[in-house]
Each structure stands twice: as structure tokens, then as C-alpha cells.
Image (cartoon, rainbow, N blue to C red):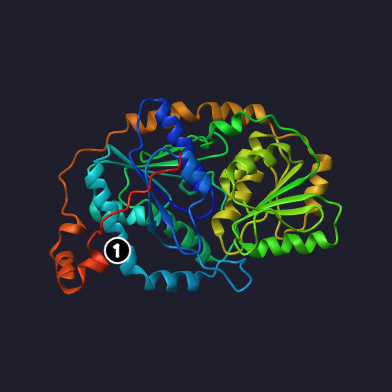
């Protein structure tokens, strides 16, 4: 069973890749729980490519400033705090799914609801968490310079998403040895589709931005550089798919297959420092420029980590001059080294999931069985707040 954070495409792509690996090893993913909200929808490509039933749940979200660029930490905390009763109900839904399917392992892709579910329900299944962010527990991880609260919030989020887990699988750009019992450093999770692409250079720049404010920044830069051809993917439904405000710049809705096609043929890649797409560009040997989302500390760390292995350069603004200079001087990243590391992905991930056996111990009283929880259910309306509603099983499109 998978629990997946639905922000951006990275964690969903990782889940799709791991499902492929598990199926080829004879395992079945019985169901997928994915965090969603009114602001973000589950992409069509994810529904089409996964074979397991998908269950959307409302989970904590980031909230941004008026320009839709920087994360507003206080607004994020306040808005999510007001929705705690809703999140409590959704944890109950996850609990009902686990009781229905009885999975041998539950794998959480950095979703906070998954962490709270592990803590409160303490299910009998193996509890494994997967994300690049868990590499922060390794001494080689490069922490970005920031105010102390940003770093603390990043580490707190790592803690909240991995509470009461048995094992952390930390995705890494390169091989690092871990001496911690509950932490294993493993290769990135890339789907077979990316490995079947033949990279070319057709003269366009590929950009990927989640926040529409950064799309406006790219558009403003292009006003002074109209000869540069740009294809930009964003999560903005205010404009139609393939919106082209002027010649040589086109904005696409999130479409995984189309994105990979443009990735394979681009001359350079511009991104908001998301781990997964950086790995895809590294695999294809593309010049990379990363602009971390302001206020999203983990992306600032991602950019430093990518620079550490020589994958690309980091910048503070979506001004493509640095990327164009990099393209002219670019000597491909050491793809053989990265390919060799990725070649170990399937056996390492399968081994970690199959071989790991949680230490047997007395089952503690879970939150769902405490008198406190039962008293809450009696005092509040269980039909609308805490009692698990009947679930609408959403079958993936064929």
C-alpha cells in the first residue's frame, strides 16, 4: 500500500516507478492513497499509468504569497491548523483502507498524513518511508544557508512524515554509505520510460514550475529574449493547455509523457530544484539550472546537493542567461557513473522492502483505541468528522 504526497510530480513519479519495480518482482500494490486539495488535482497521467485503485484524501498543503512564488510559512501553518478536524477524519479513512486490504507493507512517500497514521494507528504492517529529504540524516548532506526557522521546519517535516516508521529510504544522487540502522541510502526512482529515451538537442529550453508566479517571471524574461524557444510545464488551469502568449514560448499543463518527450529533445533544463526531474535531466545528460522556490528550504538543499555531484548550477531568479551560458560550455554530466548507480535501484529497493522485518514487540495501545479518542467520537458528530465514511473506489483509467 502506498501513501503519496500529491504536491508537484516528484513523489507521484517515484511511486509509479516503485510500483513498476514491485510488479516485476511479483508483488502487488493493493491501493494508493494520495494527498490532494481544491488547489491541486491528481494529474491524468498518474491515474492512467498506475494499476492500483486511487483514493484521494485531503492533506496538508503549502500556501504561497500574493505573487504565487514564495511559501508563506505562517499562512501554511494557520490554514492547515484550522483543518485539523478534516485531517483527523482522513487519517480515519486511511485506517479503514488498511483494515480492508491488510497490506504486508505500507510505503509513505513523504506525506504528513501518512506519518500521523503510522503514529496514531501503529499498524502491524512494515512501515517504510521514501524521500530524498531523509538524506538530511546523513552527515554528507549539504544544508543550505537560511534562517534557523527554515531549517528547523524542514527537519520537523522530515520527522512528522516518518513518525513511527521502521525504515527510511533516502534517495540520493550518488552512493553514500549509511551507518544508521533505520536509514538506507538508495538510488533515485526513475521509471522505465525515461530509460528508453534517446536524448537529442533540438534548440529549445524546457522549464518546469509548480507555482504560476514563476511562469510569469519566465514570460517577463522572454519579452526581452523572444528568439529563445521555451516550453514550460506548470500547474495553472487559468490558461488552456499549450497556451502560447507569443511566438517561441508555450505553456503546457502537466502531462508526463509530453514532458519526457520535451526533456529528451531539449538543449537545457530549468526547474525549481525538485529532486525527481533533476535526476531525469541528469540521466539524459542535460545542462541544468535550478531555482529553488523561495521559502522551500528543501529545494535550496536539493540545489546544493546537485551542485555537489556536478549536475548543474543554482540561481535565485528565472533569468535564463546563466543557463544559456552553461549550454555553450556544457560537457555532459558523468552519465556512466549516474547510470551505474541507477542500475542498482531495483535490486536495492526490492531488497530493502522484502528483507526488512520489523522488530517484534508488544503491540502498544494505539490512539484509535484510547478512551480519549472514544470520548471525542461520542461528543462530536462522527458522521461528518471522525467516523470513516464509505469510500468511493476510484479505478484508474484504462
Depth check: give the residue in front, 368 or 329.
368
Is residue 130 rendered to the left or right of residue 313? left
Mark 1 burial class by Cα count in 10 Å: few <14, some 14-19, many 20+ = some
Q: Which x, y percent locates residue 213?
A: 65, 65
Is residue 245 rendered to the left or right of residue 238? right
Depth check: give the residue in front, 252 or 128.
252
Q: Which x, y percent locates residue 80?
A: 41, 69
Provide the residue designation for mark 1. Answer: 88
Is residue 311 shown to the viewer in this render?
no
Residue 142 position (above or below residue 153): above
Residue name at image x 51 percent, y 68 percent: 63
Is residue 166 shown to the viewer in this render?
yes
Residue 32 position (above or below residue 185): below
Work out which residue is located at the far front of the displayed protein and give it.
398
Is residue 165 rendered to the left or right of residue 370? right
Residue name at image x 34 percent, y 68 percent: 84
Classify the position of the N terminus by image quarter. top left
Amino acid at each position: 500500500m502506498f501513501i503519496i504526497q500529491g504536491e508537484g510530480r516528484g513523489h507521484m513519479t517515484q511511486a509509479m516507478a516503485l510500483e513498476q519495480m514491485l510488479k516485476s518482482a511479483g508483488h502487488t500494490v493493493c491501493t494508493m492513497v494520495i494527498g490532494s486539495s481544491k488547489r491541486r488535482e491528481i494529474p491524468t497521467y498518474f491515474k492512467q499509468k498506475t494499476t492500483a485503485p486511487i483514493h484521494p484524501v485531503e492533506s496538508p498543503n503549502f500556501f504561497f504569497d500574493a505573487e504565487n512564488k514564495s511559501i508563506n510559512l505562517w499562512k501554511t501553518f494557520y490554514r492547515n491548523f484550522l483543518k485539523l478536524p478534516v485531517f483527523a477524519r482522513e487519517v480515519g479513512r486511511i485506517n479503514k483502507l488498511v483494515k480492508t486490504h491488510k497490506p504486508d507493507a505500507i510505503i509513505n512517500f513523504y506525506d504528513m498524513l501518512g506519518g500521523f497514521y503510522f503514529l496514531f494507528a501503529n499498524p502491524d504492517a512494515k512501515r517504510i518511508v521514501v524521500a530524498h529529504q531523509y538524506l538530511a540524516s546523513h552527515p554528507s548532506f549539504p544544508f543550505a544557508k537560511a534562517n534557523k526557522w527554515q531549517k528547523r521546519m524542514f527537519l520537523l517535516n522530515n520527522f512528522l512524515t516518518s513518525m513511527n516508521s521502521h525504515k527510511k529510504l533516502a534517495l540520493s544522487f550518488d552512493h553514500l554509505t549509511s551507518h544508521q540502522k533505520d536509514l538506507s541510502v538508495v538510488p533515485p526512482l526513475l521509471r522505465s520510460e525515461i530509460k528508453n529515451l534517446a536524448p537529442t538537442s533540438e534548440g529549445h529550453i524546457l522549464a518546469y514550475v509548480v507555482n504560476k508566479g514563476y511562469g510569469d517571471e519566465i514570460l517577463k524574461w522572454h519579452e526581452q529574449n523572444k528568439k529563445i524557444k521555451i516550453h514550460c510545464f506548470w500547474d495553472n488551469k487559468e490558461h488552456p493547455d499549450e497556451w502560447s502568449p507569443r511566438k517561441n514560448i508555450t505553456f503546457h499543463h502537466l502531462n508526463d509523457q509530453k514532458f519526457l518527450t520535451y526533456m529528451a529533445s531539449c538543449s537545457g533544463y530549468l526547474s525549481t530544484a525538485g529532486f525527481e526531474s533533476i535526476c531525469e535531466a541528469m540521466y539524459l545528460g542535460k545542462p541544468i539550472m535550478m531555482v529553488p522556490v523561495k521559502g522551500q528550504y528543501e529545494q535550496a538543499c536539493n540545489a546544493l546537493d546537485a551542485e555537489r555531484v556536478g549536475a548543474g548550477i543554482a540561481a535565485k531568479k528565472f533569468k535564463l542567461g546563466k543557463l544559456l551560458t552553461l549550454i555553450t560550455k556544457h560537457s555532459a554530466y558523468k552519465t556512466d557513473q549516474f547510470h551505474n548507480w541507477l542500475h542498482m535501484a531495483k535490486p536495492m529497493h526490492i531488497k530493502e522492502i522484502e528483507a526488512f522485518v520489523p522488530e517484534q514487540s508488544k503491540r502498544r495501545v494505539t490512539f484509535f483505541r484510547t478512551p480519549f479518542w472514544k470520548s471525542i467520537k461520542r461528543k462530536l458528530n462522527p458522521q461528518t468528522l471522525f467516523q470513516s465514511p464509505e469510500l468511493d473506489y476510484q479505478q484508474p483509467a484504462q
